[in-house]
Amino acid sequence: MKNFFVLFLIHGSLCNGNLLSINPENLETWKGSCVLIPCQINETLHFAYLPHASVAWYFRPSLADALFDYNVQPLFDSSKTLEDHVNLTSPNFQGRVRFVGDLTKRDCSLMITELHMNDSGTYNAKVAILGENNERLHLLFQSAKIHVRETPPEPKVETRRIQTPGLWAMKVICSVSYHCPNEPMMLTLRGLEKHPQKRNIGNRTIQTIVSFEPTWEEESKKVICLLTNKDGSHKSKTTLQLDVKHSPLGVQLVLLNDLPIKEGDNVRLNCSVSRSLPDDNWYNWAKSDSHTVELRYSGPKLLTFPASPGPATSYKCEACNWLGCTSSQAVTVDVHCDQCYKTPLSIRLNSRASWKGSCVWIPCYINEAPHTVISISVLWYFEPDILEDYYDHLLYDSSKTPMNQMNLTSPRFQGRVHFIGNVTLANCSLMITQLQTKDSGTYHARVLASIPDYPWPLKRFMIAPVNVTETLPEPKMETVPVEIEERKTAKVICSAPYHCPEENMTLTLSGLEEDRLSSQDTTIENGVIRTVLNFEPSFGDHGKVLKCLLKSETGSQRSRNTMKLDVQFAPRSVIALPETKDVVMMGQSLQLRCEVGKANPQEVTYAWYKKEQELVAEGALLIISKASRKHSGIYHCNATNKMGSSRSSQIELSYFCSSSQPKDCYLKVWSQ
């Protein structure tokens, strides 16, 4: 009996599961090298062993019309003998084709050696598998493309940043495709020899990796990735210039003052950085002394402040960029002041607010009894250059005559600066009139005082910020307490900054009845004009809008603010009403509802009662599922919020039976 076969043609790349695979399908190599074409028969066919399998390889073939086979000579055919291969293999590939697979292990790989440029093209594999009992013949097809270059390709070089807690590192990776295991190749990174190099060969790639924590030494360094063969001869290379970023280096804190530092001197601390990439640094400062824990704050690179008497203080700076921060050494500042604790001298100032066209009074008081100070001089400046010991922008100098003041005062402030203090009374106050918005800024007072038995004049610096707005500020309105309640005394307070005693201002409240507003009390102190209204809120005040009006004496300037009163009160207008018709037959359902007219807050709970005995209800709703004679009686509900409870009107349920038909009994609902 003749054997016959059922033939299956399967193209691996088109079948589900890729029964025959070549991966990768595109391989790049170079002249004179070799290439291993990986070919694998997958287990999808469920063949435990392949005793009747064969493989044939072709170069640039085309399928015959019958689609049963390729129509060119194979490069290799496992079903042929070595002698047959000499006659079968194309002359161009004679002696250069080697089957390196093992069909028993489903490996159908092929190697081409001593590659020529014209070896570039498509290589096709055909695998024939004879099934169990020799009944089925499976044909599997797959292809690969090979590109042969004149020279080896340039290695690929890339850098990656590695960020871990407390460490920032760089990784330089050099790699090249590698499809010829017969030819040992090496990748070397030149320029990073002091760091260990890790070499990997796998997945048809040669890879060399260097990981290191970058320093300024690697900044802009050129790195060469060199591909060589076993004897070290040059193959190809790629050059990369490192883009190294690092946190600030060489951070030093320098005290720029000559010693000793005397009270009133300008202390100047400079935070210097030798290298930083990127160099857009920011700075943090830390200070501590024997009485305080370390205080931290952000500041400029050059920190400047007046020397004040007190314990020796330690300062450190920290320079930061987005990669990290580096701290400096500590510098101790000790202010030389033999008599400071016996003859304290200080100035009291605070911030001011005013508006265009008005004036501002900057209060300044020297806290020292006049008889202990031999002499005092006061100088005022507007935003001076404190690095040059308050140079320029002079406003006033008490040691000069009125005529000299005209020549000294900054032209911008001519005729608008008035010293209203009295140095003999330890008062150093200043007033600026006819204000302009550009007058906003910091005003500095420098006071020099001579004290008996003190080796040098005492010098004090203080700053008063002034903000000049285009128009009058909007008054501030508030209630005390914040949550006001019905029938409990409360306060409405309206206030505004007021730093110009030469300009009469009024502040008034409106929005309530005249007789209730008459008790307003207006005061002016500590730079604030304030009016206070004491009143007892009622339910009717809830939602009323109070107005606070600030205006000048002539009424030419004014501003206002409003506030809606939020008065909290217990539920009001509580009613009980039926949800169903007025007559309910026995056995039918009946519903009564509790409703609230107004309440603040609106979170309300409900309780139902019959003859003052509390019933089980569902919130505002009382449900009687089956009406009976026992349900007759008088009902009411209570509505409660945090402010109190209110009782509703009553509902009466009366029991009746018809005299003509005694079985027709019902409840009559009477609501008030």
Image (tube, rainbow, N blue to C red):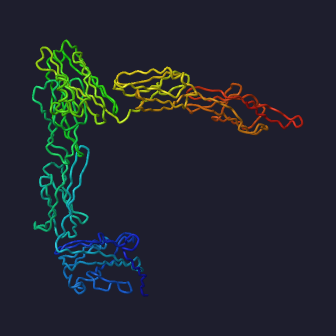
In the displayed structure image, the side of residue 669 where residue 554 appears, left or right: left
In the displayed structure image, the side of residue 602 where residue 293 appears, left or right: left
**x and y percent of residue 467 in the render?**
31, 33
At a point 67% along the width and 31% down the height, the residue shown is: 575
Say above or below: 19 vs 333: below
307 or 561, nearer to the observer = 561
**x and y percent of residue 486 in the render?**
55, 25
Residue 106 appears in the picture as rendered: no
213 or 320, nearer to the observer = 320
**x and y percent of residue 512 in the render?**
53, 26
In the figure, residue 585 lies in which quadrant? top right
Residue 211 appears in the picture as rendered: yes
Q: Quadrant of the C terminus?
A: top right
512 or 181, nearer to the observer = 512
647 or 391, nearer to the observer = 391
**x and y percent of residue 136 in the render?**
41, 79
Count of numbered badges drawn on the protein? 0
